[in-house]
Image: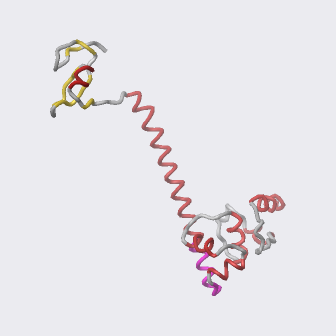
Amino acid sequence: MEEEKCEICGRYALLKEAIVDGSQIKICPLCVVSHDAIVIEKPTDEQIANIHRPIYAKEIQKMREEARKRERAWNFGRIVKEAREKSGMTQKELAEAVAEPEKTISRLEMGYPQSEGLIVKLKQFLRTRLRRPSEIPDETEEKQGLDFKSKELKISDIKKLEDEKK
């Protein structure tokens, strides 16, 4: 970059594009400060290439993943509610049957994500599919003998049952 003449004071310097009194002009750094100018910062081609694309792609991917999670949570809740109502149970009765707080069942039915252990308990108790077949195969549904009253069910228990299947 080469030094140019400031449009306000006439000094030669590396100028900045700025807005002063409603006009866009090229001025030196001293005039930027003394005239309370609004500097117009333009990104370089390199900044545009390196910053905007990767961030944009990552943000889109993250938004899609979050949307999928919300959709899955909502679908589980809807399926649980329909199965519960079909069996003539209240949320409180279902909660007692699977040893969970009523609030947990209510939140699940409203679409809030819940633990894997709760999903497995409800799936077996209500005898319904709460996961896509690719996520939990039908064969494991019949083999898993879980105690619905247990509050000690952990993800590791589910993994052990999956390993037994293999």
Asked whether residue 120 is drawn in magenta, I would say no
Q: Which residues are magenta?
A: 77-89
Q: 84 or 13: which is nearer to us? A: 13
From the viewer's perspective, tell me whether residue 9 is left or right of residue 134. Answer: left
Location of residue 147 with respect to 21 vertically, above or below: below
Q: What secondary structure prevails in the magenta region?
A: helix
Residue 130 lies in what quarter of the image?
A: bottom right
Q: Position of residue 134 (x, y in %)?
A: 67, 61
From the viewer's perspective, tell me whether residue 33 is left or right of residue 78. Answer: left
Location of residue 75 with respect to 32 vertically, above or below: below
Task: Specify the quadrant that holds the N terminus.
Answer: top left
Residue visible at 67% across and 75% down? Answer: 128
Residue visible at 45% across and 43% down? Answer: 56
Residue visible at 44% across and 38% down? Answer: 53
Q: Position of residue 51 (x, y in %)?
A: 44, 34
Location of residue 20 with respect to 5 vertically, above or below: below
Residue visible at 26% across and 14% down? Answer: 13
Residue 48 lies in what quarter of the image?
A: top left
Q: Position of residue 150 (x, y in %)?
A: 78, 71
Location of residue 45 with respect to 100 vertically, above or below: above
Q: 159 or 20: which is nearer to us? A: 20
